[in-house]
Amino acid sequence: MRALVVRLSAIGDVVHTLPALHALRAHGHEVGWVVEPAASVLLHANPAVGEVVAIPSSRRFRLGEARAALRQVRARPYDVALDFQGLWKSAAWARLSGAHRVIGFARPWRREPASSLLMGEHVPLPDAAVHVIDKNLALLRAVGIEALGRREFPLPDTRAEAERVAAGLARLGMRDFVILNPGGGWASKLWPPERFGELGRSLRDLGPGLGMIVSFGPGEEALADRVVAASGGAAVKSFPTTLLEYVELARRARLVVAADTGTLHLACAIGTPVVGLFGPTDPARNGPFASSDRVVRRVPPCAPCHRRVCPVHQGVMAEIPVDEVAAAARDRLAAALSEVRPAV
């Protein structure tokens, strides 16, 4: 059977759909994926994906590019299209794919409920599907796959990236380090960079030779500079990394401290210990899933809230104190000493 995964964005959401991809492949399905450019790097050259159809993003929509992508999707008919996103745009791509079956979440579980009109089959969610990963896995019940609780994340081969990251760490003189990641897509979900700097100062006494690296994505260099400046010499700025190079950087880290962002979810996917910082979004739904990972949160009255701009939860992340995050980091690092991690 040929199955089309429709999960257009964002990076963290694509990461959370990878276990469903693994389950489909494990049950013999040939899988294609419709995705926007930013997250497509996680799928190109991914051994679990047979075809990647990169479509124009909503912000840079081009009709000609969309038509070309649609022709690509329809050139090799799919037996089933699975809408993991629950929006009008994802529902439209699933419906227009030409798949014989178009499956999505039932109306109450969709981000844009009325988009269920474009679905041919509607899947209700069981009570056990609390985390978004299990929500995605529950959608597979429509094709006869029971996979709740699975946590396998197929990713592309990153050996070339590993060599570049090793060279970058050598230039920084870093062998044993914690990643502080202040950036992300939604400003309202981010911890202030000065707090990250204070955290770096607080953790500098954790052991001889343990360094603090401040990672950053495109357009976030100034944010990283603010963390480094606030750290009083405790942290250094990372060398620039692609998304797959960040994966290799995180593989080598003792700990990643980040808000509810794609970088946090990638670290969770590869098994790096994390401390997640949460406010408006619910960590039970999309936070760390390893029992030994830690979450520090301040809950606003509007929670769970997925609005990028919200006057109710504006500023709630700044209420998270540095000493609470530092205590969680120390606790997680101590727990990691007894864990066996895959060799890098």
Image (cartoon, rainbow, N blue to C red):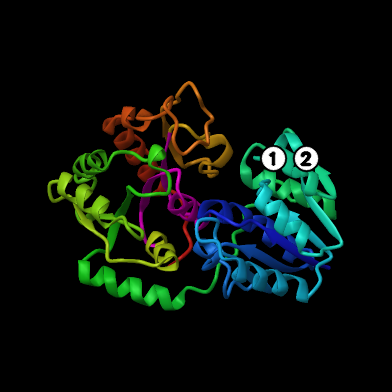
Residue 200 covered by magenta stretch: no
What is the count of numbered marks? Answer: 2
Q: Give residue 272's position: percent from left, percent from top.
A: 44, 54
Q: Please name the residue shown 20% across and 53% down the image.
A: 225
Q: Please name the residue shown 58% across and 68% down the image.
A: 43
**In terms of depth relative to the viewer, which is nearer, 31 or 22?**
31
Cβ atoms at labels 1 and 2 below 8 Å apart: yes
The segment highlighted magenta reads 252-278
Look at the numbered disc 2 and give the secondary structure of its residue. loop
Task: Sort mark 2 into few (<14), some (14-19) or many (20+) by Cα contacts within 10 Å.
Answer: many
* Residue beneath disc 1: 110
Which label number is shown at residue 176? none
Where on the picture, by quarter, is residue 294?
top left
Image: 293 above or below 140: above
Where on the picture, by quarter, is residue 191?
top left
One can see residue 125 in this view: no
* Residue beneath disc 2: 106
Left or right: where 327 falls relative to 260: left
Q: Please name the residue shown 40% across and 63% down the image.
A: 246
Question: Mark 2 belongs to which amino acid?
Answer: Ala
